[in-house]
Amino acid sequence: MRVTQFSKYTPYLSNLEEIQSRKYLNELRVSTGKQIVDISETPDLLVQKKRFENQINLHQQYKKNIEYAINFVQHTTDTLETLANNVQKIREIAISATQIGASQDVSTLGKQIRGLLDDIINNLNSNFDGQFIFAGNLLTPDAIAQPPGSNNNLPFEIIQETPSTDNPSGLKVIFKGNTKKLVVNTGKFTSEALNTTADELFSDTLLSDLNKVVDLYNLLVYNKDGTLRKDTDLFNTDDLSKLNNYQKEIWQMYDRLNRANARNGALINRLEAQKDQTASLLTAFEGYRSKVADTDFALATIQLTKDQSTLQFALQVGARLTQATLFDFLR
């Protein structure tokens, strides 16, 4: 049998290369903190890692959606509180106007009503992050159409019509949005509607409730014949009856606003619970990914130490192997 120099080195070199490769991979694991440093070595781990990363990315998006929803609804809640307070002030003015002697201040009360109505319209046109909160799914001015008589691209507006006996000021509140819901995905099988729509705030989208405030303003500022009311123009029985009816209808609007806000409070509680649940899932998925993708430093360090010792021993064997002669194989 013929023994060549090449044949005696082949198994040794193959083993030496394997040891060096294993040592190199463990050095990478220790230095980078990543378990997967060679795709060909751990293809199954790579598949698991990608699967967990997809879940992490998906739930991070859910978390962003929920956080946006919470901020949107919280802004809506704060705005509705301001709206309800202004409506309550209008009701208090209406009640004050029925008191004896209040007729001497009706002009001042009328101006207060008009100022509060302007504030209410400004609140109804409020936006969050550049998007209207009470206009349905018409979120920007570009989406709002201007009907005849309108002067802006806001969802709520006080327009000026021709004065009449029934409406001596000619003022009218109009709504140019819609009542469609804004829905966001908060999980794989869950979603929430964020916005409070006009039909939830008022009895109808013609804003009959708010136009009762205009009627109240007209009653305080104008006489029945359309002339401006003077301090000496006292309320008659019919005027007092109207005042009483207006304050009752305004109270109903106040109650409707508060009920809408109570629903928003419940929605925020649900969103907070979903946020906590999503955060828990994210933590779990990140933990699973870490087990698959991150280095077990204790194990990798032990293995690296073994590889270093094995390599050193192999090199010593190789040194002795190079000193052998043909006669060593013929013994």
Image (cartoon, helix red, strand yellow):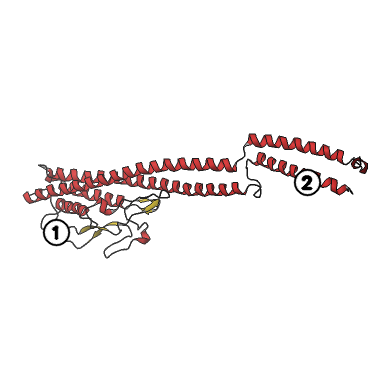
Quarter location, residue 328: top right
* Label 1: element kind: loop
* Left or right of residue 64, residue 73 in this image: left
Quadrant of residue 167 within the rendered picture: bottom left
> On the rendered structure, is 38 left or right of 128?
right
User: How many numbered marks appear?
Assistant: 2
Please give the label number shown on residue 14: 2
Residue type, numbered disc 1 = Asp
Where residue 88 appears, x then y in whole percent?
22, 44
Task: Out of 271 and 313, give the one closest to the viewer.
Answer: 313
Q: Secondary structure at mark 2?
A: helix
Query: Horizontal and vertical percent for residue 59?
Result: 47, 47
- How far from the left and from the top, in percent, is residue 64? 45, 47
Asked whether the viewer can see residue 184, the reply is yes
Question: Marks 1/2: CA distance?
Answer: 102 Å
Q: Position of residue 215 (x, y in %)?
A: 17, 54
Q: Amino acid at mark 2?
A: Ser
Near-viewer residue (292 or 109): 292
User: Relative to the observer, which residue lies in front, 272 or 95?
Assistant: 272
Say which residue appears at 93% left-offset and 42% top-offset. Answer: 327
Residue 232 is at least partly visible in this image: no
User: Mark 2: few, some, or many residues within 10 Å (few <14, many ≥20)?
Assistant: few
For the C terminus, the image quarter is: top right
Taking the spot 47% from the left edge, 42% from the top edge, the residue there is 281
In the picture, measured across the screen, residue 246 lies left or right of residue 126, that is left
Residue at the outermost bottom position: 148
Q: Nearer the viewer, residue 37 or 121?
A: 37
Direction left: furthest residue: 237
Circle 1 is placed at which residue position?
166
Q: How would you rate the neighbour count of disc 1 (Cα within 10 Å): few for under 14, some for 14-19, many for 20 or more?
A: few
